[in-house]
Amino acid sequence: MLDEECNVLRCERSSKKRKTCGRISEVNKKLNLRSHEEGENCYCKRYKCFQVVNLEQRNNILRDFNLLPTRDAQNLYLCGLSVIDVPICFKALMAIHGITQQRLKTLKKSLQETGHAPLDRRCKHSNRPRKLTADIKKKAMEHVRLFRGRKSHYSLYESSKLYLSEDLNVKRMYNMFQYKDSLSYESYRTLFVNKFNIGFGYPRSDTCGNCDEFKAKLKGLEVDLKNAFNSEEKCVIEKKIRDLETENKVHKLKAEVFYRRKRATRIYCQSSSIREAIAMDYQKNLSMPNITSNETYYKRQLTVNLFNIHVLASSDSYFFATMRPLLKKEQMKCPTSLYLYRTQYEYQRVNNIL
């Protein structure tokens, strides 16, 4: 069953948020490229254009035209319509594609003079007195490289992304840049986003014990390898390093299988109202009372334990709080929390909990 859900999961397309920052002119270009609207009926008595091309066909044509990624692709498509054997008038062609008469004249002139579709030359001229020089770009990139970051320790795969301190941001980095009179904040931010893979803040504060043990052992073996004198000793250490890397790879693959099954189970439960999947976790212990005074801080005797039940299908979370003395380390009553969840919060129609 899980294999089928995994296949469904692979078919899911990851959605990406459309970039909205940048110059207003660049944003307007993208909006104009994808916002063509159908014009008025031409009422052509000769060809009867809007009868030959019905409403559904016109909607499909306009939708596909708006989905073309660039203006050059749209021009190439419009120039290729001359070989399609569906006679319509000039006004109908403009109305169906939501374009102007001037654009069609430009396409016609380019076909007559060059024989191919025109290329978009906007922002490609050489008359740019305020263009960023290569020296300024180099200095800005060197300035970004001065900040020391660290890689994410809580990831299954090797990633080139670095994380800087949460106290930093692009604005503060730009204020530290000494050549900022020659470079605007917007240009600095564009270089930062397009040329680097850097984030701010650290994604997780806890680490995997097996991964920490692997890193510590690997670092020790690398030191032993540098200090090894003969080839036999080096071969033994290299074999230990390979075995250690294999064990760590297997450990990460097991974690990947777990998360894949978790996602597949969530999709499986969303398809039916009688199935539900839950995940359980112990949250951070909160000491009481929450007072910063030294005397009170070291005299705290109570802690609040939180037990979380997360419903995968609906993304709902239920927290169960329990107070206990700090000196007693007995385990929380997990079955009691599950019973309360099942009897008080879970719907009666659910008869299968995973």
Image: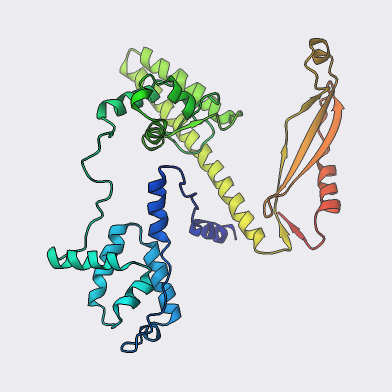
- For the C terminus, give its image quadrant: bottom right
Colour scheme employed for the rendering of this structure: rainbow
Q: Quadrant of residue 275?
A: bottom right
Residue 21 in the figure: left or right of residue 290: left
Nearest to the observer: residue 220 or residue 275: 275
Q: Residue at x 26, y 82 (%)?
A: 85
Q: Position of residue 228 (x, y in %)?
A: 36, 14
Q: Position of residue 271 (x, y in %)?
A: 65, 63
Seen from this angle, which residue lies furthest bottom? 45
Q: Residue at x 53, y 44 (%)?
A: 256
Nearest to the observer: residue 276 or residue 136: 136
Residue 320 in the figure: left or right of residue 137: right
Q: Position of residue 163 (x, y in %)?
A: 49, 29
Q: Position of residue 186 (x, y in %)?
A: 41, 34
Nearest to the observer: residue 142 or residue 122: 122
Q: Is residue 33 above or below residue 163?
A: below
Q: Quadrant of residue 335?
A: top right
Asked if one can make out residue 148 in the rendered structure from this viewpoint, the answer is no
Q: Is residue 263 above or below residue 146?
A: below
- For the N terminus, give its image quadrant: bottom right
Residue 223 in the figure: left or right of residue 327: left
